[in-house]
Image (cartoon, helix red, strand yellow):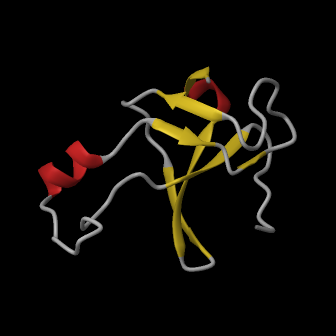
Amino acid sequence: MKFKPNGNWILIPDPTKSKTESGIILGEAAAKAQSTNVLEALSVGPDCKFVKSGNTLLIDPRTEAVRSTIEDCNYLLIQEFQVLGIF
């Protein structure tokens, strides 16, 4: 991926799913229950001090993120302070 965030922003995959792998369409409540807050950092900005690309992150589940579509895939952008820990 060529996208590189600015500052202390981190690009992560969008964990929300609108349907299961077998094709069952999920309602909003079921989709939220299927999402996770343990995600991989796909790309990090130059000002990130602790997070590196490829780290597995525990994200605060109350986090507000910027949703974006890049190269036809959905992603979230969060700031480094929203990371609770690294595995």
- Seen in the picture, residue 81 relative to 4 is either above or below; the reply is above
Viewer-side residue, 9 vs 2: 2
Viewer-side residue, 47 vs 35: 35
On the image, the x and y values in percent for residue 22 come to: 23, 71
The residue positioned 50% from the left and 30% from the top of the image is 59
The residue positioned 13% from the left and 49% from the top of the image is 29
- Seen in the picture, residue 73 relative to 46 is either above or below; the reply is below
On the image, the x and y values in percent for residue 72 come to: 55, 79
User: Which quadrant of the figure has residue 10?
Assistant: top right
Q: Residue furthest right?
A: 46
Does 53 sit left or right of 68 as displayed? right
On the image, the x and y values in percent for residue 12 come to: 58, 49
- Seen in the picture, residue 5 relative to 57 is either above or below; the reply is below
Q: How many marks?
A: 0
Q: Residue furthest top?
A: 85
On the image, the x and y values in percent for residue 28 come to: 16, 56
Viewer-side residue, 60 vs 8: 60
Quadrant (top left, top right, bottom left, bottom right) of the C terminus: top right
Does 42 sit left or right of 37 as displayed? right
Quadrant (top left, top right, bottom left, bottom right) of the N terminus: bottom right
